[in-house]
Image (cartoon, coloured by chain):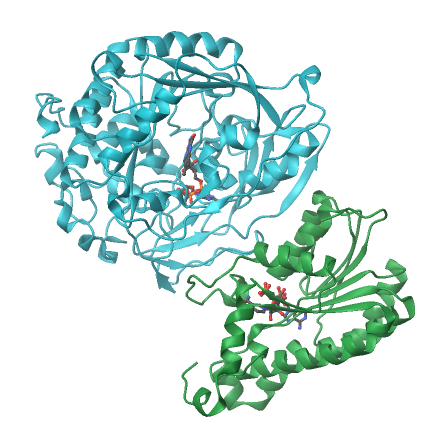
């Protein structure tokens, strides 16, 4: 059946799919008879852009693959199916004094999704990525082969699948190493910082004695306040710190409908940001005990918060750049501040130097910044295109899990390993993202005009954005995503300035 | 859910159903002693392994096609010898027949009645007597809102579930004095393999939600439960439409 119920978290771009849910890990893949139709696993759809979409093709929702296979309460080794969510794992293991080794900012993601994007969390400086803790998994390929993948078995598939964007086949189950804790609560602190230099000092210092660090930045601040924000840090409890009584926080509420698009406008965002920063003034709070739920997943208590942005959806943008030269990230903040486009949530974190086993993993030593923008037409896309160039110049990268509009040239510059990954992609698997970022680009033409309009929304005027996202199945099968074209990067257009894009 | 001093003994028929699995997960967390019955041994093994990890105190399994009524006695004997007492029975198996095929061919319609009604009648005959002698327990059966009023698009399924509702009503009346609770579970639209080809909208629920409702209703010793709760209102409205009007509707 074809329908448009399955979207990504940013609700942009829109896509239409045939849906074939998976129910049993022992079943063969329900592949479409038409070989030109591509398939893609779909977890909780918590990726923002189009990496979990396969417009015109088939999605395999994996949520019913949610069985546990094995748990050893002595070693903390858990084997479960790939559709189990991180929240379900926590609900199971926290009372047994085990915790996820790495968790992203929401618990509503599946194990398969966490592996396919090789997600990171507030402890990247200590623990690396999710993939660092995946001991092994089974990969089901479209030819029916089941590959047991680990650092010792089928290692190239192990590496290609971690951060492999769902393209190498279906992960049916995985074995994870959990980590021991003494209690569900954490010791947490909130520390304000006045500007980016302060951030770096505070964050570097905190990383020495805190397992978890992450900062929120007031993106509406400019001038001397540029880059001010709040750093959240925390540690699990030591045995002697465990409280006698603990009240588990209460239930969630759900946003029933799309709010009108104007709900999050630059005024509300600016006001919120200022209020939120000032609320915390003037200094570091005393350490408090906080339950793991609000500490790790502040947004999870508002289900469907993505609907705050209305029907058009929104864009997330997460970049990473080296931290040794602070002027790079400062310039990026300046660009955003000058653009007048406020990000409701701006999250800053310093990555550590753990390398991931994943081939196409996003994290690398440096600092990472995640932003979300309501779609304000061409202005928003222009800002992000400009940031892409700044990131490329700094030899940084943009996170595919959050991307809906990167150009092939930028993607291929950030991830030169993409051609190696292409060797391991299953011939029946593909995604909207992959088709977009591997689309053939001509080195002679400027990058923004040579992809087809329906697959590269960044070239479009706002009024045509939605209309152009009707299904475009004709491109499926005509290209061969498993053997992408090699592309020469075109020179970056460095004479654009921050001022240009603020108009 | 409160935890019990000793593990409850629970028999689940149709244990590979999505709704049954989610219910069983909740019971396993509370260390129930489970007997699982399903027709597909491979799926059954996956479910049993999952429930073991989740905390079931003990698990037995047996493979039966519940439409083979001649095996129901053997099933009953196996369950009662191995479990030695039953606190809860959950009957979950069912199938959504192709309404059009049922209109063309009696044997298709009959098969739908066997799966969705007669098999339960056959199974409960012995199980109800067993519980009556035991003097406690709960018989929880998954029916459907479709049994509240038949409509052209699925009235064979509706007929089976409607007959099931009447049967359970009578059984409840009979067993009340023996302190046996008979629970009729009426889910609305649930996203499971049975409904995988339907377009899902606002009224659809996930099997996890239904499972929570089932466990709560068993605990509260309810008679009839609509899941989610709003189906009680929807069905109330649907049932009050006068037949002369209802027959004209395309439902
Ligand atoms: C509020 C919020 C906070 C977030 N915070 C972070 C964060 O701190 N750090 C971070 O790294 N990310 C973060 N993310 C992004 C999110 O963690 C990732 O996008 C994650 O991969 C989503 O998992 P999912 O189960 O929803 O997968 P989907 O989004 O549905 O799919 C993601 C990818 O996984 C593939 N996939 C899914 N299941 C399988 C399978 N069984 N086999 C093979 N491939 C599969 C899909 O094909 C797709 O390519 C956040 C997202 C949100 C909404
Ligand atoms: N989904 C809904 O919208 C909905 C709404 C109202 C009521 N219900 C009822 O809920 C119950 C559970 O269904 P579900 O939604 O969870 O769907 P499901 O996952 O498809 O479960 C149906 C189960 O019945 C089993 N079954 C069918 N015929 C059988 C037989 N002859 N012997 C043994 N097992 C048999 C199936 O076994 P296999 O796995 O081997 O096929 C399957 O496990 C059913 O009674 C259904 O009528 C469902």
Give me the chain that's cyan: A
Task: Name the foreground residue: B116 vs A36.
Answer: B116
Counting labels gives 0
Task: Name the foreground residue: B214 vs B93.
Answer: B214
Task: Name the foreground residue: B133 vs B221.
Answer: B221
Residue shown at the point (89%, 67%) measured from the top left: B135
The quadrant where residue A279 appears: top left
Give percent across and percent down for residue A192.
39, 15
The outermost residue toward the bottom is B244
Q: Is residue A25 left or right of residue B58?
A: left
Q: Is residue B250 left or right of residue B228?
A: left
Judged from the image, the quadrant occupied by ligand 1 is top left
The vertical placement of A292 against A19, above or below, is above
Residue shown at the point (29%, 17%) measured from the top left: A227
Give percent across and percent down for residue B216.
68, 56
Residue shown at the point (49%, 33%) measured from the top left: A297
The vertical placement of B147 against B55, above or below, is below
Tell me if I can see residue B249 in this picture.
Answer: yes
The quadrant where residue B126 appears: bottom right
The vertical placement of B100 against A326, above or below, is below
Q: Is residue A428 left or right of residue A241?
A: left
Tell me if I can see residue A486 in this picture.
Answer: no
Give percent across and percent down for residue A422.
34, 37
Image quadrant where one finds the C terminus of chain B: bottom left
Give percent across and percent down for residue A358.
44, 28
Rendering colour (chain B): green
């Amino acid at each position: 059946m074809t329908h448009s119920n399955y979207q990504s978290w940013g609700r942009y771009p829109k896509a239409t799919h045939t849906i074939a849910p998976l129910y049993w890990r022992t079943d063969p893949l329900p592949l479409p008879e038409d070989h030109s139709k591509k398939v893609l696993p779909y977890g909780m759809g918590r990726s923002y852009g189009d990496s979990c979409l396969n417009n015109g093709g088939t999605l395999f929702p994996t949520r019913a693959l949610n069985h546990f296979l094995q748990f050893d309460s002595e070693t903390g080794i858990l084997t479960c199916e790939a559709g189990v969510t991180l929240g379900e794992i926590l609900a199971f293991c926290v009372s047994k004094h085990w915790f996820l080794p790495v968790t992203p900012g929401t618990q509503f993601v599946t194990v398969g999704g966490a592996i396919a994007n090789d997600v990171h969390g507030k402890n990247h400086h200590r623990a690396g990525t999710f993939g660092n803790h995946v001991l092994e998994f089974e990969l089901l390929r479209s030819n029916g082969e089941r590959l047991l993948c680990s650092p010792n078995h089928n290692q190239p598939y192990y590496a290609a699948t971690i951060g492999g964007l769902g393209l190498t086949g279906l992960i049916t189950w995985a074995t994870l190493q959990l980590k021991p804790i003494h209690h569900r609560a954490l010791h947490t602190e909130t520390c304000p910082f006045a500007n980016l230099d302060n951030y770096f000092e505070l964050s570097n210092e905190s990383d020495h004695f805190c397992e978890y660090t992450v900062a929120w930045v007031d993106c509406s601040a400019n001038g001397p306040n540029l880059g001010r924000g709040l750093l959240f840090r925390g540690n699990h409890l030591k045995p002697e710190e465990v409280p006698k009584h603990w009240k588990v926080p209460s239930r969630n509420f759900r946003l029933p409908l799309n709010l009108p698009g104007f709900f999050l406008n630059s005024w509300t965002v600016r006001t919120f940001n200022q209020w939120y920063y000032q609320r915390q003034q003037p200094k570091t709070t005393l350490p408090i005990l906080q339950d793991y739920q609000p500490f790790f997943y502040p947004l999870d208590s508002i289900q469907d918060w993505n609907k705050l942005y209305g029907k058009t959806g929104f864009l997330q943008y997460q970049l990473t750049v080296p931290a040794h030269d602070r002027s790079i990230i400062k310039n990026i903040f300046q660009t955003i501040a000058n653009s007048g486009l406020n990000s409701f949530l701006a999250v800053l974190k310093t990555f550590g130097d753990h390398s991931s086993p994943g081939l196409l993993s996003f994290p690398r030593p440096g600092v990472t910044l995640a932003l979300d923008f309501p779609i304000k037409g061409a202005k928003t896309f222009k800002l992000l295109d400009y940031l892409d160039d700044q990131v490329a110049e700094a030899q940084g990268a943009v996170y595919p899990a959050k991307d809906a509009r990167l150009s092939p040239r930028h993607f291929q510059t950030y991830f030169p390993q993409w051609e190696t990954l292409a060797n391991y992609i299953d011939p029946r698997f593909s995604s909207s993202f992959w088709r977009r970022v591997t689309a053939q680009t001509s080195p002679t033409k400027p990058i923004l005009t040579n992809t087809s309009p329906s697959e590269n929304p960044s070239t479009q005027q706002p009024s045509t954005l939605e209309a152009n996202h009707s299904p475009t199945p004709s491109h499926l099968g005509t290209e061969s995503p498993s053997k992408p074209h090699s592309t020469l990067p075109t020179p970056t257009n460095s004479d654009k300035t921050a001022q240009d894009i603020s108009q | 859910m409160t935890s019990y001093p000793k593990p409850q003994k629970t028999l689940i028929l149709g244990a590979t159903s999505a709704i049954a699995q989610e219910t069983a997960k909740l019971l396993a967390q509370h260390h129930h002693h489970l007997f699982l019955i399903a027709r597909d041994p491979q799926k059954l093994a996956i479910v049993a392994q999952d429930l073991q990890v989740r905390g079931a105190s003990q698990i037995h399994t047996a493979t039966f096609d519940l439409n083979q009524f001649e095996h129901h006695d053997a099933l009953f004997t196996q369950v009662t010898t191995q479990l030695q007492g039953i606190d809860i029975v959950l009957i979950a198996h069912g199938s959504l027949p192709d309404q059009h095929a049922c209109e063309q061919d009696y044997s298709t319609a009959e098969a739908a009645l066997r799966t969705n009604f007669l098999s339960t009648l056959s199974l409960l005959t012995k199980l109800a007597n067993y519980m009556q002698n035991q003097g406690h327990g709960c018989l929880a059966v998954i029916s459907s809102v479709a049994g509240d009023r038949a409509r052209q698009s699925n009235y064979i399924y509706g007929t089976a579930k409607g007959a099931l509702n009447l049967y359970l009503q009578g059984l409840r009346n009979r067993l009340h004095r023996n302190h046996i609770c008979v629970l009729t579970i009426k889910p609305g639209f649930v996203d499971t393999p049975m409904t995988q080809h339907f377009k899902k909208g606002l009224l659809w629920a996930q099997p996890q939600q239904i499972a929570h409702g089932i466990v709560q209703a068993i605990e509260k010793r309810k008679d009839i439960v609509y899941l989610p709760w709003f189906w009680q209102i929807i069905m109330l409205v649907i049932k009050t439409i006068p037949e002369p009007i209802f027959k004209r509707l395309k439902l």
